[in-house]
Amino acid sequence: MQKITVQGVEYDLELTVGAFAEISEACPNGDFSRIDELFQLPPGKAMLAAAKMLAAMSRGAEEKKRYEDPSYSPHPLTYQELVNLPLLEYKPIQAQLASVMGGCLSEQKIKTEASKKKEKAAEK
């Protein structure tokens, strides 16, 4: 999980399936591979897009924690909290988004196992 600090509070961020889907919806044609285009938007629109991404990833992390521990009470960073920050406070947070996204994507590891048919064929 990645972390970000907003107004002295540390929030976990996770690119869960739900967060990925939300972020993809914000991308042109719903295509996550075009995410860079969101940062090419005029500054105000890029800031709002970044706030939506951060809020989605915060929700993802909090929901993951609740899934793993049903007694956990989620407290995600919200879109409204982000868009109501003073501009000078928000800009450094927005600047961290690229590294946070990169960190979340690099943490994704997929374990695969050889199929039983392939194992039997290799034994022959």
Image (cartoon, grey):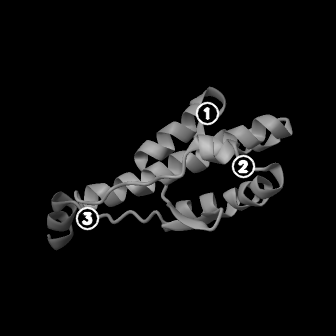
Q: Which element type, helix, strand or loop, lies under badge 2?
A: loop
**Which three-letter amino acid code belongs to the residue tagged 1?**
Ala
Is residue 60 depicted above or below 27 in this figure? below
Which residue occupies the extreme bottom position in the image? 123
- Counting residues from the N terminus, which is met first, the one under dot 3 or under dot 2? 2
Q: Nearer the viewer, mark 1 or mark 2?
A: 2
Residue to which mark 1 is pinned = 26
Who's the residue at 14% across and 70% down the image? 124
Give the Cα distance between marks 1 and 2.
21 Å
Depth-wise, is mark 1 or mark 3 nearer the camera? 1
Q: Residue 117, percent across and down? A: 17, 58
Q: Are marks 1 and 2 in contact (CB under 8 Å)?
A: no
Res 29 quadrant in image: top right
Question: At which x and y percent is residue 32?
Answer: 59, 41
Callout 3 amino acid: Ala
Q: What is the C-alpha distance between the residues marked 3 and 2?
A: 50 Å
Q: In this figure, which residue is indicated by the disc labeled 2?
A: 85
Please say whether residue 105 is visible from this viewpoint. yes
Secondary structure state at the residue bearing disc 3: loop
Mark 1 and mark 2 lie on one chain; the one further toward the N terminus is 1
Provide the residue designation for mark 3: 114
Quarter of the image for residue 18 reads top left
